[in-house]
């Protein structure tokens, strides 16, 4: 997460409203005048840190109701809290206006702390927290991560990355080949056991806490879906890359722990790793589309810097499986087309 100050008129109005709401919470003795940016993400939400008279700090969330649903955040926060993982507690809420006051989990993200010296312990902590969530999964509590939603996400790739970012229109044959690849990916995704899925379980949304149990943020879009999704988010992170040997080692450690915990992971490690890779590929294709959309629709051009790594993940996975060969051919064609107009990958 990165600090961000928004000086737009509409945002200033909401900030003033947020400060007024905080001033009306006398039991916490907040000092609204200390409010300052805490972090921002890819959504319309903004987070501010605000101090109290007793020296503590809190996080105030500004989630414009027209774009965001704080009820979902409150709901998922309650579910995750019951599993024993560390998530912000909701201390006060104004659902109608989209304001929440949360406990402060600090400002040290995994992304800022990760190094060759710290990575193993941090990832094992994150894996243990993930398993703690998954073992308590129940159907009917969170929305289904069904075929319709998975395919809708995949379509962000042709719509925003190919169509908008590369300005390329696929031929009918290319579209047919891409959809065939999508269906192969979806067949694998849908066959996997279902658990609670955070959907953005990665280094920008995990906080380093003193007790070793990572603080977990940005969980409001959680669903009930494929068991390898969050592991793929964690180990094939769009913001930090590790060598394949380390990724494989950590994936195996998750697999061993998950089996001991009674989770229904594929009992064959090779088949499990294939599930992990196909799930990661679904996410990578989606993220390529999302990062392009963040630039062209929302004016957040910093995400373009992260496209090359996500494309590298996409290519490496697609090259390893015969049924994904059509995707490799399409990527080759798109790269040649992009080179003609000056794009680099």
Image: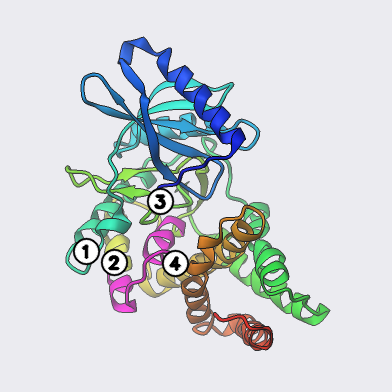
* Residue picked out by circle 1: 120
Identify the mark nearer the N-term, 1 or 4. 1
Task: Give the structural element (helix, strand or loop) at label 4.
Answer: helix
Q: Magenta residues: mostly which secondary structure?
A: helix
**Disc 4 packing (10 Å; few <14; some 14–19; many ≥20):** many
* Residue picked out by circle 3: 2
Identify the mark nearer the N-term, 3 or 4. 3
Question: Foreground residue, 314 or 141?
Answer: 314
Residue 5, image x, y percentages? 46, 43
Q: Quadrant of the C terminus?
A: bottom right
Dot 1 and dot 2 residues touching (CB under 8 Å): yes
Vertical position of residue 1 compared to residue 270: above or below: above
* Residue picked out by circle 2: 250
Task: Give the structural element (helix, strand or loop) at label 1.
Answer: helix
Dot 3 and dot 4 residues touching (CB under 8 Å): no
Residue 183, image x, y percentages? 66, 68
* Residue picked out by circle 4: 276
Q: Is residue 186 left or right of residue 53?
A: right
**Disc 2 packing (10 Å; few <14; some 14–19; many ≥20):** some
Identify the mark nearer the N-term, 4 or 2. 2
Question: Foreground residue, 181 or 7?
Answer: 7
Question: Foreground residue, 244 or 262?
Answer: 244
Vertical position of residue 197 compared to residue 252: above or below: above
Residue 72, image x, y percentages? 53, 33
Which region is colored magenta? 229-250
Q: CA distance from mark 1 to mark 2?
A: 8 Å
């Amino acid at each position: 997460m990165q600090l961000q100050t928004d000086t737009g008129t509409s945002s200033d109005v909401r900030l003033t409203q947020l400060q007024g709401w905080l001033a009306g919470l006398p039991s916490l003795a907040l000092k609204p005048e200390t409010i300052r940016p805490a972090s921002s993400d890819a959504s319309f939400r903004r987070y501010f840190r605000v101090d109290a008279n007793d020296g503590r700090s809190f996080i105030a969330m500004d989630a414009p109701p027209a774009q965001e649903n704080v009820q979902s955040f409150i709901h998922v926060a309650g579910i995750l809290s019951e599993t024993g993982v560390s998530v912000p507690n909701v201390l006060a809420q104004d659902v109608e206006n989209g304001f929440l006051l949360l406990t402060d989990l600090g400002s040290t993200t995994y992304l800022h702390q990760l190094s060759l010296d710290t990575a193993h312990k941090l990832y094992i902590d994150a894996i243990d927290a993930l398993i703690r969530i998954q073992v308590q999964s129940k159907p009917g509590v969170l929305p289904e991560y069904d075929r319709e939603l998975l395919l809708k996400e995949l379509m962000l790739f042709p719509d925003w990355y190919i169509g908008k970012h590369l300005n390329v229109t696929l031929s009918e044959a290319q579209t047919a080949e891409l959809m065939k690849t999508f269906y192969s990916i979806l067949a694998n995704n849908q066959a996997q056991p279902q658990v609670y899925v955070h959907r953005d379980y990665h280094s920008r949304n995990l906080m380093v806490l003193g007790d070793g149990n990572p603080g977990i943020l940005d969980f409001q879009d959680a669903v009930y879906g494929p068991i390898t999704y969050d592991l793929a988010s964690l180990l094939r992170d769009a913001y930090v890359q590790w060598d394949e040997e380390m990724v494989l080692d950590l994936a195996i450690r998750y697999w061993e722990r998950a089996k001991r915990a009674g989770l229904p992971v594929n009992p064959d490690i090779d088949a499990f790793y294939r599930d992990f890779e196909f799930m990661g590929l679904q996410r990578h294709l989606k993220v390529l589309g999302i990062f392009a959309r963040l630039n062209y629709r929302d004016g957040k051009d910093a995400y373009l810097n992260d496209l090359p790594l996500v494309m590298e993940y996409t290519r490496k996975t697609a090259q390893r499986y015969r049924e994904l060969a059509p995707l490799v051919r399409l990527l080759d064609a798109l790269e040649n087309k992009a080179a003609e107009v000056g794009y680099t990958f």
